[in-house]
Image (cartoon, helix red, strand yellow):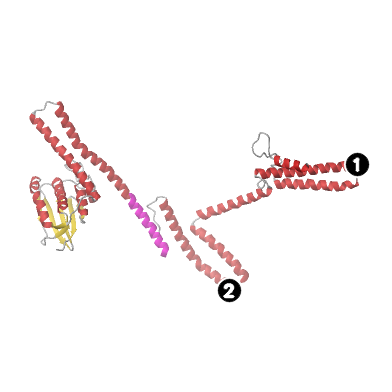
């Protein structure tokens, strides 16, 4: 019966009516080791008191022993019940003085370790290396002083004095590399690693870091240039499409609203015809530029006589040259060189260049078309003096929708040079521009075909 009652009390320990889970009373919140120590003291005192009862009269002794026995039972049950409650709550180990002491020591050691780690990270590298060097050297010195002769200690001191400058040089070099890497990581592309007094692998690594900075700087500049070109492209396309469309809309509106005389109607229709043709040409150039840059145009390579093709295309433009007051000077290579190209596409390249010359060359000047053999290549050149100040670079002229006249008052889409470059590339040739003041020069180069 007593055993069943004890088991019931242990099972009921920690439970309270109306409270879910395990409930800890004030006894259960006392640190376990402190509570056990107090219980041990009380039990020991009761035991000693019980031993001393033997000298007392029978009746008082029996009463006192009964009281002590009851206290012992209560004490044992209290210990058992608090142990049961603590086990159930999972706080058996955590609610002890030993646990508090160990946790305090662990936190103290962790804080010390964090402080040491912080100092190690934020101290300059040469200070870190110096402290490690001094620590290891002192440990070695103690060992040598205890177990070696004085001569060995002297040799050790000399060796350490020789090692110290090398260690300082190494630490300073590593600090430079570390600072350079951190600057790059922070986005400072103008930072560079000082390579003075660096040698071997460390110097090579420093050069690599500087190269990375320069490469990233070029990439950023290229991206900024691309963004600027993209903005200009949108502006130029909008202008080139809006101008003819505005004319078409306005003149159609005039034809609708006004009682237009036949002569006036013819004038309006001529403007409509010119502007619609301009818009059609812009659309065709856009399609051709897209095909040329994507490489989807069919290319049929065959032997082409450069002199014959250049003479033909310059002859086709003779009347336009006279109209623009330009004097063509054609200088052909005496060897009559041949290249491997697509005649139709190459004609289109020449046509774009001559069309640009007629639009942008200064009236009353000469324009030069030359072909010459240079080693194993044939170079075809077109030169003219611009009628407009060329205040942009050759690379910018090659961009789509960029014209030689910034006012964009002349006819054209600004796609001619871009199309010419793409078509030349499709035929395995090279195309580049040279701008020197008002001198404009386009160079086309193909491998010489050995017949």
Quadrant assignment, res 429? bottom left
Residue 404 or residue 19, whichever sits in front = 19
Q: Please give left or right for residue 41 compared with residue 268 in the image.
A: right
Write the residue at 81% across / 47% down: 45
Residue to which mark 2 is pinned: 151
Magenta highlight range: 195-220
Q: Which mark is residue 59?
A: 1
Give the total of numbered labels.
Answer: 2
Is residue 342 visible to the viewer in this orientation of the structure? yes
What distance separates the C-alpha of mark 1 from that of mark 2?
89 Å
Write the residue at 86% across / 42% down: 64
Question: Picture coordinates of residue 205 (x, y %)?
Answer: 40, 60
Q: Are marks 1 and 2 in contact (CB under 8 Å)?
A: no
Q: Is residue 277 above or below residue 370?
A: above
Question: Picture coordinates of residue 184 (x, y %)?
Answer: 40, 53
Q: Residues within 10 Å of mark 1 (few under 14, many from 20)?
A: few
Quarter in which the C terminus is drawn: bottom left
Q: Please give left or right for residue 408 compared with residue 47 in the image.
A: left
Q: Secondary structure at mark 2?
A: helix
Q: Residues within 10 Å of mark 2 (few under 14, many from 20)?
A: few
């Amino acid at each position: 019966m007593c055993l069943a009652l004890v088991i019931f009390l242990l099972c009921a320990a920690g439970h309270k009516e109306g409270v879910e889970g395990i409930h800890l009373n004030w006894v259960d919140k006392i640190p376990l080791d402190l509570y056990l120590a107090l219980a041990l003291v009380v039990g020991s005192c009761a035991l000693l008191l019980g031993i001393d009862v033997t000298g007392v009269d029978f009746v008082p002794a029996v009463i006192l022993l009964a009281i002590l026995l009851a206290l012992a039972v209560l004490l044992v049950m209290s210990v058992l019940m608090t142990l049961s409650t603590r086990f159930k709550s999972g706080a058996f180990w955590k609610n002890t003085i030993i646990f508090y002491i160990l946790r305090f020591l662990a936190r103290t050691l962790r804080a010390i370790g964090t402080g040491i780690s912080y100092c190690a990270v934020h101290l300059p590298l040469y200070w870190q290396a110096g402290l490690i060097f001094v620590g290891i050297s002192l440990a070695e010195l103690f060992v040598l002083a205890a177990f070696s002769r004085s001569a060995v200690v002297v040799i050790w001191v000399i060796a350490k004095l020789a090692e110290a400058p090398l260690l300082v040089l190494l630490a300073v070099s590593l600090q430079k590399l570390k600072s350079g890497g951190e600057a790059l990581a922070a986005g400072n592309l103008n930072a560079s690693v000082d390579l003075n007094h660096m040698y071997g692998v460390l110097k090579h690594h420093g050069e690599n870091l500087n190269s990375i900075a320069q490469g990233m700087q070029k990439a950023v500049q290229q991206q900024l240039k691309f963004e600027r070109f993209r903005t200009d492209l949108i502006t130029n396309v909008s202008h080139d499409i809006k101008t003819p469309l505005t004319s078409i809309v306005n003149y159609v509106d005039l034809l609708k609203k006004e009682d237009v005389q036949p002569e006036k109607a013819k004038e309006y229709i001529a403007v409509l015809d010119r502007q619609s043709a301009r818009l059609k040409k812009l659309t065709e150039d856009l399609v051709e530029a897209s095909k040329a840059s994507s490489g989807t145009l069919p290319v049929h390579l065959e032997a082409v006589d450069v002199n014959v093709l250049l003479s033909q295309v310059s002859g086709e433009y003779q009347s336009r040259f006279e109209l623009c007051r330009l004097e063509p000077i054609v200088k052909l290579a005496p060897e009559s060189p041949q290249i491997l190209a697509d005649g139709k596409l190459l004609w289109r390249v020449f046509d774009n260049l001559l069309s640009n010359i007629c639009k942008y060359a200064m009236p009353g000047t000469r324009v030069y078309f030359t072909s010459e053999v240079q080693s194993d290549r044939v170079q075809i050149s077109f030169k003219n003096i611009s009628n407009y100040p060329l205040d942009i670079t050759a690379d910018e002229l090659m961009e789509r929708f960029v014209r030689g006249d910034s006012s964009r008052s002349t006819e054209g889409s600004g796609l001619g040079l871009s199309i010419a470059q793409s078509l030349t590339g499709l035929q395995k040739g090279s195309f580049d521009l040279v701008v020197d003041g008002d001198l404009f020069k386009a160079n086309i180069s193909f491998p010489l075909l050995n017949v």
